[in-house]
Image: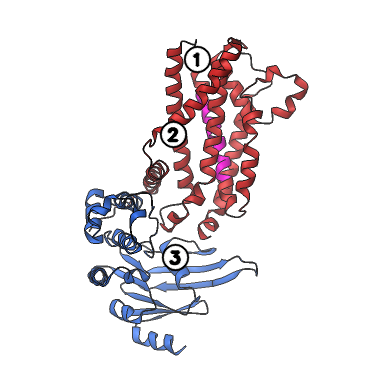
Chain colours: A red, B blue
Amino acid sequence: MAQVKARAPVKVWQDVVFAIFIREIRSKFDDKVGISWAVIQPVSFIFILSFIRGRMDGGLTHTMPTFIFMMYGMIMIQLFLSTLASTATAIHRNKALFSFRQVQPLSAVMANALFEILVKVAVIIVLWVAVYFIGVEMRLDDPLMVLLMLLNVWLLAASLGLIMALAKEFVVEIDKIRNLITRPMFFISGVFFSLQDISEQYWPFLNWNPLVHSIELSRQAAYSGYQAQGVSLTYLNLTTMMLLITALIFYQLSWRQVVSR
Amino acid sequence: MIELINVCKYYPSKLGRQYVFNNLNFTIPGGHNIALLGKNGAGKSTLFRLLAGSEYPNQGQVTTPYNISWPVALATGVHPKMTGRENTRFIGRVNGVTDLEYYEERVKQFAELKQKYDLPVRTYSSGMRSRLAFACCIAIDFDIYLIDEAISVGDPKFRRKTKHALLNKSKTSNVIMVSHELDDVRLFCDSAILIQHGQLSFFNDLEQAIDIYEAN
């Protein structure tokens, strides 16, 4: 009979997250296109939209090629929206698994968040190659900053997702609210515009949104001549950290009830 | 030995908290094959899930040095879109099985799924699903197996095989069982825990417990 080994708690978490990770891939992509669709779909969406927008004015937006300008916005917002959508439903979808003592709700959320960031890394690599071949000038002045922005957006989305996934177990309607508030995010996060294009008196309506900060700052990091205005790294970092801590506190308080329902 | 210390378990409802256990202190002795007896709604399944770690008490704790199985009933954690083999691997990984290949083959053999083992579970009949779930559990070495109605799945031939496997298991490890089938209970268990009004009482003699259970 199959032996079971005694594992350290960290190892249990690793095994469980990995197992759920594989399970998510197998159950989400069971058609012929398979997992490649997870990359093809966002790549084509981002590429086509950025390309059309780039063609429309054909030149530069605040010193950076419009194509690249759009791409940063699209990648960030897509990373945010897809991570939020998949983590916010992760707990509900994997409810049956909590019968196993080893599986805790957080492992399902972690597996989903991990999957989303890996997909986006693949998307970025494919887009990078595409940009190289169409010959757009591509600069990356401060790659570490761009990575930090990606990490920020990812953590932000995962924390919000965790909060919503937990809340959903107490308030069923939370999904509808999530749909309502994520819809406009695409248009108010600075994907199509820069804060520089908007007169300063209207900034307060937009710059509460940490995504505006992350998108502007990542453009700034890639093209140091971009001169992003009205955004702050401190604000972004603090928001992310606060949300992450709030999410973890909420999790610690409520996961036992969530498992029981 | 499984210790329940100050366990409170309730479910919230429109009518306020529905207590299943309130301040329960109890020690389930080791080395026994135990039947959980009690009327419908007495808290058998709740106790069962608390022991398995599938649910947690609202207060207090359940501690044990033993390696306890998950509640086998129905097809716990089996995903319809994945094949039997993939589901087996998932369960193996979660439980920390050392040799996954060997485990896969054991399950395949026991569940008698033949080549269907590599087809998605949604193409299985309900009997086959429960067979897979049961095989996944019995193929792992646990100290204590938690058995629901799982032994009454499948056709008579598989049921005989299940009983045989469980009887073999009960020599080396222990079984905690919930069943309304007293014949099954008599076959596997030597002692019983009676659940009445949120309190537990242990009976070393199974027949004595059954008498009280039936008298109520």
Residue that appears at 65% across and 70% down: B15
Residue that appears at 32% across and 70% down: B151
User: Could you tell me if residue B164 is visible in this image?
Assistant: yes
Amino acid type of the residue tagged 1 in the rendering: Leu
For residue B81, side relative to residue B108 (left or right): right
Badge 3 density bin: few <14, some 14–19, many ≥20, Cα 10 Å: many
Disc 3/disc 1 C-alpha distance (Å):
54 Å
Q: Chain of mark 1?
A: A
Residue that carries the numbered disc 2 in the rendered image: A38
Taking depth in this image into account, of B61 and A207 the one nearest to the observer is A207
Q: Chain of mark 3?
A: B
Q: Position of residue A45 (x, y in %)?
A: 51, 27
User: Could you tell me if residue A66 is visible in this image?
Assistant: no
Amino acid type of the residue tagged 3 in the rendering: Arg
The image shows residue B153, relative to residue B119, as above or below, that is below
For residue B112, side relative to residue B199 (left or right): left
Please tell me the numbered disc located at residue A238.
none
Residue that carries the numbered disc 3 in the rendered image: B49
Image quadrant assignment for residue A204: top right
Residue that carries the numbered disc 1 in the rendered image: A140
The image shows residue B202, relative to residue A79, as above or below, that is below
Magenta-colored span: A147-163
Amino acid type of the residue tagged 2 in the rendering: Ala
Q: Chain of mark 2?
A: A
Disc 2/disc 1 C-alpha distance (Å):
26 Å
Disc 2/disc 3 C-alpha distance (Å):
37 Å
Image quadrant assignment for residue A155: top right
Say what secondary structure mark 3 lies in: helix
